[in-house]
């Protein structure tokens, strides 16, 4: 997915959010924004929005010298999610279709996006998330096809998204493990927004279920210019890729792989790409018309 002109204000807002969270002076904020604006003069619109959003976080890190401004929030949401984990597990245990319920729990977890929700926003209501699991409509629901593909698959790569959300992923992964597949879970190698790192995956207990690897990158989405050989190996051999979140969708929608995207469409351009409404949630199999790029 390419960057559109409408993406630029969002990139600027992400920078402003991060600066406010970092609690730096107005002088530092102005210096950071000026740097970002200078970089955006030569922005490559053929890059994905996720790739270009990295410019905001790179500018913040370079000027403020704060490596991980979202660290405390990530820890907070990991803990809040872990507190409701027993209830999430109980929903699955009581379900007549545990795998589907677990998949919907994974979908619900994708609302935890601190890149959009930081300053001035209400805290996430984890109790409401649980209440919504059964009733939440999926604008695209390719779960039946996922089950067909799953029966024939041997290797799965599950690309994680956010801290806090990793606990919801754990619920889905636990059910996938019962299908006797080789599952690998990937996280970022360094802090970027509230994206999950190995520390978050281990805090959620995912490492006790499946192998956890790092992407080799601290960039948003799936930026193949900065990933590790291990990630590339797992990506190439995967029969199914489960991709969480909007940034990964923006990066992987045109890759010629059997990918299932789980996300909430948090911007109009992504909603248009999926042919759904803004803020719809989907479990969508990759469409051939989105492209067929090779690494």
Image (cartoon, rainbow, N blue to C red):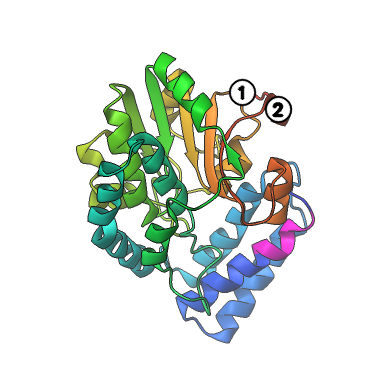
Give the labeled residue for mark 2: 291
- Quarter of the picture holding the C terminus: top right
Kindly identify the residue that appears in the image at 30 percent across and 47 percent down: 201
Q: Where residue 216 appears, x then y in whole percent?
A: 42, 39
Q: Please report the residue visible at 62 percent of the width from the left and 57 percent of the height from the top.
A: 279
Residue 108 falls within the magenta-colored stretch: no
**Residue 256, labelled with which disc?**
1
Image side of residue 201 versus residue 141, left or right:
left
The reply to whether residue 2 is in sight is: no
Q: Secondary structure at mark 2?
A: loop
Q: Quick check: 203 left or right of 213?
A: left
Residue sitting nearer the eye, 198 or 94: 94
Q: CA distance from mark 1 to mark 2?
A: 7 Å
Residue 150 image offset from top left, x and y in percent: 42, 22
Instruction: Between residue 104 and residue 177, name the one nearer to us.
Output: 104
The part of the chain drawn in magenta is: 5-11
Can residue 116 be seen here? The reply is yes
133 sits left or right of 120 in the view: left
Please tell me which residue lies in front, 152 or 113: 152
Work out whether 278 lies above or below 287: below
* Farthest residue, direction front: 96
Residue 58: image location, x then y, percent: 55, 59
């Amino acid at each position: 997915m390419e960057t559109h002109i409408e993406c630029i204000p969002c990139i600027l807002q992400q920078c402003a959010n991060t600066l406010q969270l970092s609690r730096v002076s107005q002088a530092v904020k102005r210096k950071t924004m000026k740097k970002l604006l200078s970089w955006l003069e030569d922005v490559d619109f053929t890059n994905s929005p996720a790739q270009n959003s990295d410019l905001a976080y790179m500018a913040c890190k370079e000027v403020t010298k704060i490596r991980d401004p979202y660290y405390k929030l990530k820890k907070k949401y990991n803990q809040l999610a872990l507190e409701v984990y027993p209830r999430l597990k109980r929903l699955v245990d009581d379900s007549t279709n545990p795998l589907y319920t677990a998949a919907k729990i994974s979908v619900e977890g994708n609302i935890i996006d601190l890149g959009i929700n930081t300053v001035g926003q209400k805290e996430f209501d984890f109790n409401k998330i649980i209440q919504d699991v059964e009733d939440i409509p999926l604008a695209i629901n390719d779960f039946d096809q996922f089950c067909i593909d799953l029966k024939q698959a041997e290797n799965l790569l599950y690309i994680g998204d956010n801290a806090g959300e990793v606990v919801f992923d754990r619920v889905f992964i636990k059910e996938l493990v019962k299908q006797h597949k080789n599952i690998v879970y990937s996280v970022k190698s360094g802090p970027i927004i509230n994206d999950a790192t190995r520390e978050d995956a281990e805090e959620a207990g995912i490492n006790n279920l499946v192998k956890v690897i790092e992407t080799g990158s601290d960039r948003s989405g799936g930026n193949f210019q900065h990933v590790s050989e291990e990630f590339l190996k797992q990506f190439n051999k995967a029969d199914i890729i489960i991709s969480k979140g909007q940034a990964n969708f923006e990066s992987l929608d045109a890759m010629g792989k059997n990918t299932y995207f789980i996300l909430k469409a948090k911007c109009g351009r992504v909603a248009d790409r999926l042919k759904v409404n803004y803020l719809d949630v989907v479990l969508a199999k990759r469409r051939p018309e989105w492209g067929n790029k090779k690494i």
